[in-house]
Image (cartoon, rainbow, N blue to C red):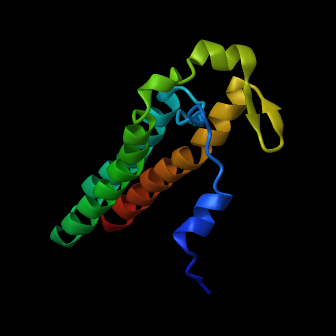
């Protein structure tokens, strides 16, 4: 429940700082090279392209457009978010830095190769699933 407190009581309890409080620096870069994100988006959009060309019917135009908008929006919004605070001086990690230092994950530090595998395994499997599905459909109906 809320309670209405008088203004003078709040003023008595308030802490007033002589200097402004330092702003918190937030890392918005996600710590991975841009190439991994571009590859992920490319594989997801490639899946949609394979499905749209392999199963081309008028009934799939709207769902494919909606999926494309979701993928572009799902990766576009974080791209905009990373550019919100350029004064922090943070930048996306370069591939050479990732190879040299690796990256810290929940289970420990991993190498660049392992990080790339972890990031790209699902998009690659989904793309291969699309190619396999279109191949099966093409061999059955053709």
Asked where in the image residue 140 lies, by quadrant, the reply is bottom left
On screen, residue 44 above or below 22 = below
| Left/right of residue 96 with respect to residue 86 in the rendered view | right
Q: Residue furthest bottom?
A: 1
On screen, residue 35 above or below 58 = above
* Quarter of the image with the C terminus in it: bottom left
On screen, residue 142 above or below 6 = above
Asked where in the image residue 24 lies, by quadrant, the reply is top right
Q: Is residue 90 visible from the viewing direction of this image?
A: yes
On screen, residue 103 above or below 68 = above
Q: Position of residue 25 (x, y in %)?
A: 58, 33
Q: Residue furthest left?
A: 58
Q: Position of residue 42 (x, y in %)?
A: 39, 39
Q: Position of residue 16 (x, y in %)?
A: 61, 45
| Foreground residue among 5 and 81 | 5
What residue is rendered at 53% in x and 23% in y?
90
Q: How many marks?
A: 0
What residue is rendered at 38% in x and 60% in y?
139
What residue is rendered at 30% in x and 54% in y?
68
* Quarter of the image with the N terminus in it: bottom right
Q: Position of residue 122 (x, y in %)?
A: 58, 49
């Amino acid at each position: 429940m809320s309670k209405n407190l008088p203004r003078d009581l709040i003023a008595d309890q308030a802490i007033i700082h002589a200097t402004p409080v330092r702003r918190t620096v937030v890392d918005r870069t996600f710590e991975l090279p841009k190439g991994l994100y571009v590859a992920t988006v490319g594989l997801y959009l490639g899946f949609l392209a394979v499905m749209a060309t392999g199963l081309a019917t008028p009934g799939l135009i709207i769902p494919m457009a909606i999926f494309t908008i979701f993928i572009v929006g799902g990766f576009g919004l974080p791209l905009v978010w990373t550019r919100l605070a350029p004064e922090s001086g943070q930048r996306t990690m370069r591939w050479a830095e990732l190879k040299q230092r690796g990256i810290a994950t929940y289970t420990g530090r991993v190498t660049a190769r392992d990080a790339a595998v972890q990031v790209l395994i699902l998009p690659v499997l989904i793309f291969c699933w699309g190619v396999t599905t279109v191949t099966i459909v093409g061999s059955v109906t053709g």
